[in-house]
Image (cartoon, coloured by chain):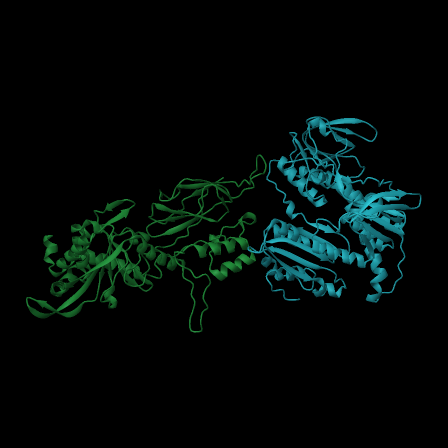
Amino acid sequence: MAPYDVVIIGGGPAGYNAAIRAGQLGLKVACVEKRTTLGGTCLNVGCMPSKALLHASELFAAANTEFATLGIEVTPKLNLPQMMKQKAESVGALTKGIEFLFKKNKADWINGVGKLAGPGKVEVTSEDGAVTVLEAKNIVIATGSEPAGLPGVAVDQVRIVDSTGALTLPEVPKHLVVIGAGIIGLELGSVWRRLGAQVTVVEYLDRITPGMDAEMAKTFQRVLTKQGIAFKLGSKVTGAKASKTSVTLTYEPVAGGAAETLEADYVLLAIGRKPYTEGLGLESVGIETDKRGFIPTDHFKTSAPGVWATGDVILGPMLAHKAEEDAVACIELIAGKYAHVDYNLVPSVVYTAPEVAWVGQTEEQLKAAGRAYKVGKFPFSANSRAKINHETDGFVKVLADAATDEVLGVHMIGPQVGEMIGEYCVAMAFRAASEDIARTCHPHPTRSEALRQAAMGVEGWTMQA
Amino acid sequence: MADIMTPALGESVTEATVAKWSKKAGDAVRKDEILVELETDKVSLEVAAPADGVLSEISAEEGATVEPGALLGRITDGAVAGAAKSSSPKVAAPSSTPVPVPAGELQPEPTPGKAPPTSAPIPDTSAPKAEPVLAPSAQRIASENNLEPAAIAGTGKDGRVTKGDALAALEARAKTPAPAAAPAAPRAVHEREERVKMTRLRQTIARRLKEAQNAAAMLTTFNEVDMTAVMALRNQYKDVFEKKHGVKLGFMSFFVKAVVHALKQVPEVNAEIDGTDIIFKNHYDISVAVGTEKGLVTPVVRDADAMSLAGVEKEIGALGKKARDGQLALEDLQGGTFTISNGGVYGSLMSTPILNAPQSGILGMHKIQERPMVVGGQIVIRPMMYLALSYDHRVVDGQGAVTFLVHVKDALEDPQRLLLDV
């Protein structure tokens, strides 16, 4: 068989987007994926199923608390199996969609475990144990990441679960303890909180959501606390002991002090993710990972000729949309085109209610860099649409260079702000000034007006607050 | 890759001088960005980039003379650092099409004495060209501060001008002493004032006049001429002259002939500076200021030395008619070696005309006025005219300038000298 132009190992956001782009560019491409469905963690056990549960649980919570205010009287009853079923159906439809896109773009999907087997060779072991070797001019590693473990906390996916297990709990926990106040932990904690669980989040650091602008994180924590999520910050988990029906979690203050215990019926370990390169045969081409397991790259090129890497296995934010950017750029470079990914412009979104979204630099980063900046803010409580919808928690913050007015960072907490951050991503890609946003008409009444009003605030002419 | 070609310069214009490159080799350029300014005698025009990319080569350096169609430079496809081994072309305009910017900008003679012409018979044919893309904020800054958008270097995506770029351009302007010191912000227009934007032509005139003043060591010497003899001669022969030649015998022909006569005696006045050289011209092409509705223009009476008085009068008449009818061609305005300006027709008694660069001399004629003069110990009434010669002291010494004016005076006071060539 003629060698492939590109063989991709991994069918997640990095892998499948790479395959599609390669197909579009007329490259002969195959994508090796060990799951029986495409889409990787994101589609199968990550972004997508979690969003299905976030959406459903948000409506359930609204039916319980908000509807009566609006004049709708109902007594909602949870049907968890149905909720899980609709989630599975949505996920199934999405993974089928990728299969369709593969066919459309003439990308071969090869089901099996892929492994590097020396330069230009990818060995695929299928489920029945059959081994085939694919010849490839270029190999793209897109094997993604897996949940990081914690000593003393053994994930059994029954009582002690990771993000994958937390998406398929058979019942609503009475008390769910989440280890790690990162995005994944808070999203899944929110899901079960809304469905009725008592939720306690234990975090090693003295703040939630590291990487998020500190002011936003503080506001976010206050909002979540109001929703009934308890936080134990600055706490180091030392062990979790599962019985048949419960888990005993021990933790101690990071600052020193006596150990304490928490009783829970479920524990979710969500302290982050780590690159997944196990059994990948990196040694066969002489690639060594860094201390944290990432594959070092230079514009997606690894140290081995003809071997490229994208997505969560390389440095940068571990996000599906970043992986997608990597993938497109990597394939375009393979095809001899120009490509560049600006990681500073990779947005982040927390899909809780309210949502948190941001792009660019935080105030802490700007201060550390010694960059003079100006701040414009606008609260959703002054936004007409948010007010009408009783969704007034949160605000928009725009950070701009003190001299050039170039937008350097945008941070939002508020209703569905994840859908609005893209505007600022485009603006920042064009190196817009806050004034450019301030002088751009936004529709009324929409929440997007808050973006404009905050931009006006940078130069002190916010008009509606 | 795209070639930057010298555009058509206008009928009968065969060459242009590369005046100024606004980009260096290696600079990123965007399509339609002004790269280089060309100058002909009468027209300066701007050549824009035919494509996005990098100015890889400048073939015609500043000062070089180029012909239409000649290569000025080359643009190669923009490769951004740190990209692929072979960045494939994402390009852009078919190459080697001549740059379509006939931004004809007429450069009229700076007319002495009187305010320079506001317009000229040759239409300003600035072709519509793509404006640079400015962010809304940059647009505001440029508009409020009269920044030329094309002059702001854009650092945004695809060369777009960001607010920071506009602010930087503003700051740069504040730092450099602007040649035409534009106010940082337009001052408020009061009730009984009116603000009118200068035409490009007008701006060019302003700039060129100032350049002439800046470049030359310019000063003016004066004399006066007794017009009795010329007036007598004219009165005596005007009817016969007109009958025979079909043109009136005016004063201009005498002045042209007197000037040519004087130029032959003092050749440095008929010269120009070129770098460290002086070019002496052995032809006598006299630019003559002609009033038109739109202002003054200075068409050229060529080879005036070989013409009769009637020939000069006919030529001036023809040029004047063309000027008033707006029919002057570019070539009618080009190549003068010396200028005569007559502010006297408007009543000026004395003036200090500004040189018509690169010429080295300009004669100012003035109003003829009867004044008491002392002739042979007697006070007599004589029709007198003050003469002014502005000259470039770099080329012409004081002695030469004074001598020149004395020759003009002598020839006019005793026109037979012209006949005898003494």
* Image side of residue A345 versus residue B66, left or right: right
x, y percentage for residue A338? 59, 39
Residue B111 vertical position relative to residue A308 in the rendered view, above or below: below
Comparing B98 with A44, the one in front is: A44
What residue lies at 23% left-to-right and 60% top-to-bottom? Answer: B364
Is residue A462 left or right of A203 when viewed as pictured? left
Q: In the image, is A390 to the left or to the right of B387?
A: right
Report x, y in % for residue A52. Answer: 81, 50
Identified at 36% across, 55% down, the residue is B106
Give the x, y percent position of residue A28: 68, 33
In the picture shown, does residue B280 fall above or below A68? above
Q: Residue at the far right: name it.
A: A244
Residue nearer the viewer, A386 or B123: A386
Res A9 seen here: yes
Question: Which quadrant would residue B64 be assigned to in this image?
Answer: top left
Q: Colour of chain B?
A: green
Q: Residue furthest front?
A: A257
From the image, state the color of chain A.
Answer: cyan
